[in-house]
Image: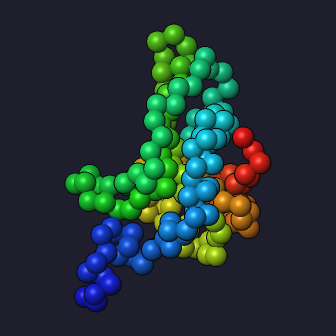
Amino acid sequence: MSQKESRAKTLQERFGFVDSDLKTPRHDEIMIWLQANAEPITDSIWKRGWHSPIDTYESIYHASIEWEYPITNGQKFTIGFIDMRVECTACLAPGRWVQREFFFEVKSSIPSIGELMRQINLYRLHKPQGYFIVVSPDESAKEVLRSQHIHFVKYDPERD
């Protein structure tokens, strides 16, 4: 085992997925923007979602927003970290509630669609009911992501 492999802390790192974007100011800028816009983004995705679209509901409550959320297997082994997790609960009718998890992966650019797909598919193995969303100013992978049931949100610093 090489020294690099022995230092890997997550399964994601052992497979060679090291997210160098995480250490950049641009990544932080997008994360801060995403947190500020999480509510309208999740509302929009939920209304037109693939798992169970909701046309009518009384209200959506955004229970929590967590940065660098650990994706684990059943034994609490860390698979990797998704950039942001947003948990929402919708009231469909009095006494009828539905909960959803939204998992956001932030990319300042997308140099490899294949690597991004492998990363997200690894997470989806452990969170199959979650909505996965890529947020980036780079729209080059938008249609491929949509064809794989991954939502895309364009980072737009002018949108508030």
Give the answer, above or below, for where 18 lies relative to 101: below
Q: Position of residue 149 (x, y in %)?
A: 61, 53
What residue is shown at x 26% (from left), y 59% (from top)?
Answer: 77
Colour mapping used in the image: rainbow
Q: Is residue 134 visible?
A: no
Give the answer, above or below, for where 6 lies relative to 117: below
What residue is shown at x 30% (from left), y 69% (from top)?
Answer: 9
Nearest the camera: 105 or 27? 27
Nearest the camera: 124 or 8? 8
Q: Is residue 1 visible?
A: yes
Q: Position of residue 38 (x, y in %)?
A: 60, 40
On the rendered image, what quadrant is the C terminus found in? top right
Q: Position of residue 14 (x, y in %)?
A: 35, 76
Residue 157 placement, left or right of 92: right
On the rendered image, what quadrant is the N terminus found in? bottom left
Farthest right residue in view:
158
Corner quadrant of residue 140 = bottom right
Farthest bottom residue in view:
2
Farthest top residue in view:
94
Give the answer, above or below, for where 156 lies relative to 46: below
Q: Position of residue 62 (x, y in %)?
A: 52, 31
Farthest front residue in view:
25
What residue is shown at x 61% (from left), y 63% (from top)?
Answer: 26
Nearest the camera: 61 or 115? 61
What residue is shown at x 57% (from left), y 53% (from top)?
Answer: 31
Residue 132 placement, left or right of 77: right
Q: How many marks?
A: 0
